[in-house]
Amino acid sequence: MEKRRRRRAEVERTLCVACGCCVKACPLGAIEVVHGLYAKVHGEKCVGCGKCARECPASVITIREGTP
């Protein structure tokens, strides 16, 4: 049986405007804005649902397939 790959959100930090929309959208509290500069995803909490990516006005969040 093949292991399912884990999905996670990933933020392009250099383009992030630190608006906090993703933080509000995340149902698991897996994202925080660091020093008012960019959003950071806590991979251990993120399930890759994509809600943050849909809410990001700068479109700098993608959902990536990770390791199992």
Image (cartoon, grey):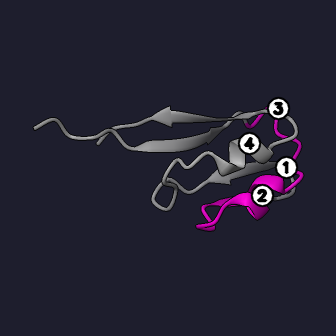
Q: Tell me the amino acid under the disc marked 2.
A: Val
Q: Earlier in the sequence, mark 4 or mark 2?
A: 2
The foreground one among 33 and 64 is 64
CB under 8 Å between callouts 2 and 1? yes
* Callout 4 secondary element: helix
* Callout 1 secondary element: loop
Question: Looking at the rendered structure, which numbered label has been put on residue 37?
Answer: 1
- Label 3 and label 4: CA atoms lie apart by 16 Å
Residue, disc 4: 54
Disc 1: CA contacts within 10 A as few (<14), some (14-19) or many (>=20): some
Q: Earlier in the sequence, mark 3 or mark 1?
A: 3
Question: Looking at the rendered structure, which numbered label has been put on residue 15?
Answer: 3
- Label 3 and label 1: CA atoms lie apart by 10 Å
Question: As displayed, is residue 54 above or below residue 31?
Answer: above
* Callout 2 secondary element: strand
In screen coordinates, is 12 left or right of 2?
right
Disc 4: CA contacts within 10 A as few (<14), some (14-19) or many (>=20): some
Q: Earlier in the sequence, mark 1 or mark 4?
A: 1
Quadrant that contains the C terminus: top left
Secondary structure mostly seen in the magenta stretch: loop
* Callout 3 secondary element: loop
The picture quadrant where one finds residue 21 is bottom right
Q: Earlier in the sequence, mark 3 or mark 4?
A: 3
- Residue 47: give x, y in percent of width and height: 48, 53
16 part of magenta stretch: yes
